[in-house]
Amino acid sequence: MNLIQLHTERFLLREWIPADVHLIHKMLADPRVEPFHTFSSPLTIETIQNTLAGTFEDQGKLKRTHYGWSILAKKDGAFRGSVGLEGAPERFRSKEIFYTVHPDHWGKGIGTEATEAVSRFVFHDLGLHRLEAGVATDNIGSIKVLEKLGMEREGLRRKILPLAGEWRDNYLYAMLEEDFFKFRAV
């Protein structure tokens, strides 16, 4: 099985391996991150194992629905976060991107650099039509990442996210293949 690697100037995006479960769990269990994800608290390692299981199963398939990468610093191999894709039915040629940057490294452009590499993979390598993302309306950092990526806010989904014990609104962002190619030299 060949795992897909994506490269940016500063980072290697390496597809998840079982050893990443502990790194991702530790990052998502951090109290600074918990308000932005939909997992129950306290977050267990089993929850992360079960969540990533579908992606691990997909890695050996020719037609895939799930992708997930650990963001590793090229200079020292240190874990900086994760980014992934979930797919819609094949006929829609669409995926949803999700990402988390370790809070010790927020504000350093990691999310922007990683999502740019994944969007290039989505449109250039997979040949998809649409890339979507949902983001809590108060998650200003992620909103900035999506807008820097060139995504447009398409709407508001009311009380769709179970965050910190309550239902919260989120914005739907998207980018079409023509948007991606119009503003980038590939």
Image (cartoon, rainbow, N blue to C red):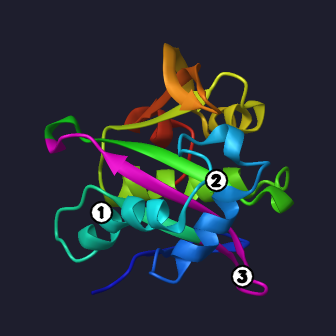
User: On the rendered structure, is 25 left or right of 4?
Assistant: right
Q: Which residue is mark 3?
A: 74
Q: Is residue 53 visible?
A: yes
Q: Residues within 10 Å of mark 1 (few under 14, many from 20)?
A: few
Vertical position of residue 148 compared to residue 14: above or below: above
Quick one: 133 or 100, which is closer to the camera? 100
Which of discs 1 and 2 lies nearer the camera? The answer is: 1
| Label drawn at residue 100 | 2
| Label drawn at residue 6 | none
| Label drawn at residue 54 | 1
Residue 186 % position (x, y): 49, 56
Residue 67 % position (x, y): 38, 62
Q: Identify the secondary structure beneath mark 3.
A: loop
Identify residue type, mark 3: Lys
Q: Identify the secondary structure beneath mark 1.
A: helix
Looking at the rendering, the stretch of residues picked out in magenta corresponds to 71-90
User: On the rendered structure, is 144 left or right of 118?
Assistant: right
Q: Quadrant of residue 52?
A: bottom left
* Mark closer to the chain start, 3 or 2: 3
